[in-house]
Image (cartoon, coloured by chain):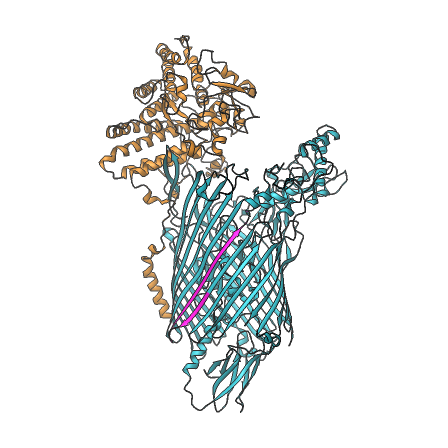
Amino acid sequence: MKKTLLFSLVFMLTLLTQAWAQTRTVTGRVTDAQTGEGMPGVTVQLKGSSTASPTDVNGSYTINVPSSGGTLVFSFIGYSSQEIVLGASSTVNARLATDSRAISEVVVTGYGAPQEKREVTGAITSIKGAAIESLPTQTFDRAMQGRLAGVRVTSQSGQPGGGISVNIRGAATINGSTQPLYVVDGVQISPGGASSQTSANVLSSINPADIETIEVLKDAASASIYGSQAANGVVIITTKRGKSGKTRIKVSGQYGVNEMYNPYEVLDASWYYALKQEAYVNQYLRRGFTREEGLAAAAAAVFPGGVPTSIPSTDWYDAISQKGKVQQYDLSASGGDEKTRFFISGSFNKTEGTIINSDFTRGTVRANIDHKLSNKFSLETTLGLTGSKSKGPTTNVGFFTNTPFTGALFIPPYNSVYNEDGTFNKNIRNAYNLNIVQSLYEEDRMTDIAQTVSNMAINYDIVPGLRFRAFAGIDFSDAKNRNYRPTSLPIYAPTGTANESFDRRINWTTSHTLNFNKKFAEVHNVGALGGFEYRQVDNTTLSSGGSGFASPLFRLLSSAATPTSVGSVFGGYKVASFFGNFKYDYKSKYLASATLRYDGSSRFGANNKWGLFYGLSAGWRISGEEFMQDLAFVNDLKLRASYGVVGSQPTGDFTSLGLFGNGGQYNDQPGIRPTQLANADFGWESSKQVNLGLDFSVANNRVSGSFDIYRKNTTDLILSRQLPSDAFPAGITENGGEIEQKGIDFEITTINVDAGDFRWSTTFNIGLTENKLLSLNVGDRIGNTYVVGKPLYLMYTYKWAGVNPADGRPMFYDRNGNITYSPTTADQDFVGDQNADAFGGAGTTLSYKGLSLDVLFQYEYGRDGFIQTGQVLEQAGSANENQATSQLSRWIRPGHMTWVPRPYEGELEPGGFYHSDFSNRFIEEGSYIRLKQVTLSYKVPTALSERIRIPSISMFVQGLNLATFTNYRGDDPENTGQNLNAYPNPRTITGGISVEF
Amino acid sequence: MRNKIIALSILASFAVSSCDDLVQVEPQNSVSTGVALSDVNSYQAVLTSVYDRLQSFNYWGRDFALLGDALSDNIFTASTLAGGRYVTANVNGRGAHYGIWGTAYAAINELNTVISTIDGLTVPTSQVGARDQVKAEAYALRAMIYFDLARVYGYEPTNIPTTGQGAGFNKSVILRITPTTDASQADFRARATIDQVYAQIESDFKASFPLFESAFAATKTAPSKYKMNIGAAHALLGKVYLYAGKYAEAVTEFDAAMATSVASLANSYTDILAPGSVESYFELRFVAATEMAGVTGGNESLFSYTNNTLNNPLGLSTFGGQTASAELQALFTPEDTRWGVEDGRSYTAAGFTWGYKYTSSNGTFTDNPKIIRYADVLLMKAEALAMQGQYAPAATLVDQLRAKRITGTPTASPTDATIINFIKDERRRELYFEGHRWFDLKRYGEGIAKPSLTGVGTIPATDFRILAQIPTGEVQLSPAVGDDPSVKLLEQNPGY
């Protein structure tokens, strides 16, 4: 879109300067220096004038130039400009080489016109769509992982299409939102789950292949144009738009597999029984019985029907796992003429999970159309439609018996999945009475979503440089959730249950802006923007449930004998805003920008309905100074400073209001009661951020990057305050307290070799953060997670001291650092925190002719992670659940040094303590480096592909999550929060082909 | 362009004053406080919320109807069968006690809302009676709830110990008689004295009487046993006077209660258990389908607590462990219809004897707890007379009851001072498993002789466990008075 804007501007200028005297015509062709192919859309301009012409699809151009001669400038985004002095010849050909700086030259910072990157004064980082368009990820937020400095992307679930969390420069809040504001083609959307049954991410409505750029506004000054919604940063997504010229059609397809690559290894039935025997013997000996009595008790407990001569064993984890097929097909067409341009695309994605009977299917359609009504009026529409279906087990973390991980990891392996006659074994012993394989096949959990993020805009150019734009956009989704538990799974309900719900989200935005850009006296570059915006969000849910089904063949609610529940929930909010931005630069050397935004929100209290947010920034392009001109080594050098105050809206819609709500029932009458006290002063969390940055590009643009250091203070945190319950049964939510977040973002790209055909570049980024809670609204701590003077997200528990080599009993440290067998709550202490000290990514690209290899590593360092699944799998054979194979290193004899206690049936030795209770035995540093992506692609030489009349054919193979380097002993170091039975991220390997003509 | 920005800001500031409507969203699942109470029906709905709170299992829904018997001497809790329920309470473990603080004060805040604001409601003449009825119920319910708080967390006016940890401890509970409508009104308060709280209770009951009468005069609607009513209010005020040692006033109130047509003596003991029993002045109506369905009934109901699992007359699965103590069983003669297998009032299972007072009489797992009933009033009146030395009239009353309860010719009640102890035993026989025993023993001030099977012995009247613990979270939240941070404005009961 940026290119097209620029292009149309140039085009208009061309029209204006038709009447030139004494001219002659020059023609020629512009080709790519590397491939030799013609380049369409290159701007050919007569230096020092406004005469310009674009190249056509074949790279050819025609331009009128003065007979007196001059210089032609050939420029194209992403390529180095070339100047050729006109001679006598009327044919001038040019070969353009790629600009070593691969970073996009133009950025969109919200509402205003695209801005040259070198004039940006805030901290903004971006990804080009090309980098992620062929990745087999279902959502673009997942594709951002490891590519942007200071942007931390974590998944809590490997479910296809599932939700993930994005934190820009850390999450400095306690109860507020931690997610950035997403703006898709100008429509603000709030991330989150769209499904109550599976894990579906609202951002999955955007096909990653349709994305032109992703821009992340990190500092408060850049984000301040979004005011009260900008405290967690802003992610601006711009989808592709058409370019005039011959219609270009692109077809691509890829196919591959998803697989689990690092499952927990658990015991087989023989080893399980062996540990069980030891556990009983140890217990019986301790209680004064004999070894034989212990063995007999073990046999009776594990095999009440008698110990079989050969113990059958089932690998349940294997039974629930599958190699999921991944398919992705894309078709797009773009083109247009001088008046109308279009980009249309369609896609289909079907991704099967690594768990049986779980998948995600999505189809998208997009039509982005631009039309010029006249010289002054133009229209834009952006239509994106998505339908998706997801199906799969509950992936909520926690001890839910119907999650595949609880069901498969913990089940004693002597249970079989099927009976001899092929029916499901329902006689599952010592494992919650549920055959998880049967449950995965027979329980329905599914969500169908219809979604659109679309908009329309009218632009009116009042005078050149002054544009009025009216914009309206909608983000709409309808999710139908369905859960059905048939009578064949009697554990849930002997007669079967069904629940259905419809969630409708309507989120519309309209904005009206005036935008002014003009250069005065060739040196004063002025830009100004003013506007009004209004956003309304309505969420409604209708749900109902029923029980009593005649047979598993009857599945709809209407077949239920008894309706059991109905629900209807409404929520919503409105935001009205006035905003303005003023930019000025002098010779692109001294840069300044000021932004104001005045936001009113229905979520704020009556005394605090409107808030003023602002940002100020300035830059000094040192490389633009005269004294730098001799330093040819430095191509670009810019110092930046910014300060801004932005907000984070409360997540509750009605938190500030005094409410009467449901007051129970009595005598068949419904009651009402005061449920919430008003807090008319309630408002936003306020975040003040100062940012200092340096952008550099040296050595013929072969080394470029940026460095940012920031401090962010979040005040007026949304916190609750307990009231004496003799006065009111609930506390109130209010603003107070402060969190400080400090950090450094650094990214660097180097071109190590650029030798014509062979090119090697590397890129590296890192974000360093630390946070500290400075104060709270009342008191100095909230539980044991938030303590004033300490970092957020603390871990507080018992301290593990290992296994006593003398007798195999588990030991802990007491508060004085002495060994104890039975710690008390007073012995608990702070043992870690969940903040990553550093995170980022590193990548390298090698290309030789049409062959290229892309490698991306992603890493996190210095974060403590839970191993909650270990609390069940690492009980040294003392409980009913199956155990990790690591438990075979249990203590065996006096003097044996090991970290696994001796098996003891029931786990609790007299005078001891449960060693599987949460202690720092189950906290481990979750640092890791992951080979996130490897892509090998080959572009068939044009000369070859032209023989079958296809200008461009590329083939590729790629892999995601190919290798992970970590000391963390859980199954996936990415899932290190509350991760009991978390769905690990899969390894994905695909191959595909992409054709353009 | 600068001018434009300035102009825009000025425009914005003009716009804003009228723009608050732009950013207004009214909730739909709840209603803003300002519009919630717009008619008599909405006030009735607030009262419904209070009745709903009375139904809480930690209040009249179960504990007030049963826990007192486990804390005292009518119940032996069979720990192997009880699923952990009342196990610690039965041996009077520290802190195992009534816990109604949060529920009671939440209800009081709602009642304060009704009482403070209903006079401001303009109603058509046809609804004046309904409005008076709401206000009358609110006053009487507030009095009842304060009385329950006072007897759980404080001593009675007549029996403040003179020795031990609680010597001279005259603190009752926090008094709040205006609603909290704003966080600034949620100030921290100290506990009022026993006399102050009893004075408030008396005043509230008395305020309810003329309103009940004017409401009846206007609506001619007979009082409902399922709601607070004039008969229950008189009876409860009589009980308050009895606890306060004001025996003459108590008799007056009991007479007033008996003069109403709300309740009368049942001919058969079976009748008192039925929903809407003739004896009830006030009972809580539980609806099986909405309030006791699913696990709630099986886990929390009176039936579940007092019946052996599976081996009960209905064969239901329960968390039962509350069995009849040997001491209770010993009080009944074979002729007494209030106990015994042949009367259907008890059965044995799993080696214990179970009282069968809660029979799922109103649906599966569902019984209506009786807050106050006729026999209670009758026996309290007899006690109040006896305490004034009027032994013969007292004996007449007791005999009147026994004639209905015992087959054949019951032995006559004594007509001398020994009738006082006789009435105490008669109360125990009549009202066992209805939650009265703990409060009776507490106000007698004679200590609690626990069932021998509990192994606890006798808890003296000066023991700290006679009073329930004020919730520790509330005490911690309360500000310190003076320099010692452990001395809080909200004083904890002695010994905790």
Residue interval drawn in magenta: A367-393
Name the quadrant containing residue A170: bottom right
With respect to residue B441, does A218 lie above or below? below
Decide if residue A767 is in sight here: yes
Name the quadrant containing residue A423: top right
A516 on left or right of B230 = right
Q: Residue A284's x, y, as percent?
A: 71, 30
Among all residues in the image, which is located at the extreme left? B125
- Residues A828 and A872: in front is A872
Decide if residue A614 is in sight here: no
Magenta-highlighted stretch: main secondary structure? Answer: strand
Q: Is residue A384 magenta?
A: yes
With respect to residue A547, does A464 lie above or below? below
Q: Residue B339's x, y, as percent?
A: 46, 16
Q: Is residue A66 magenta?
A: no
Q: Residue A447's x, y, as percent?
A: 49, 50
* Residue occupying the point 44% across, 50% down: A503
Q: Residue A951's x, y, as percent?
A: 57, 74
Q: How many marks?
A: 0
Q: Quadrant of the N terminus of chain B?
A: bottom left
Report the chain shown in orange.
Answer: B
A637 on left or right of A522 = right
- Residues A579 and B337: in front is B337
Report the chain shown in cyan.
Answer: A
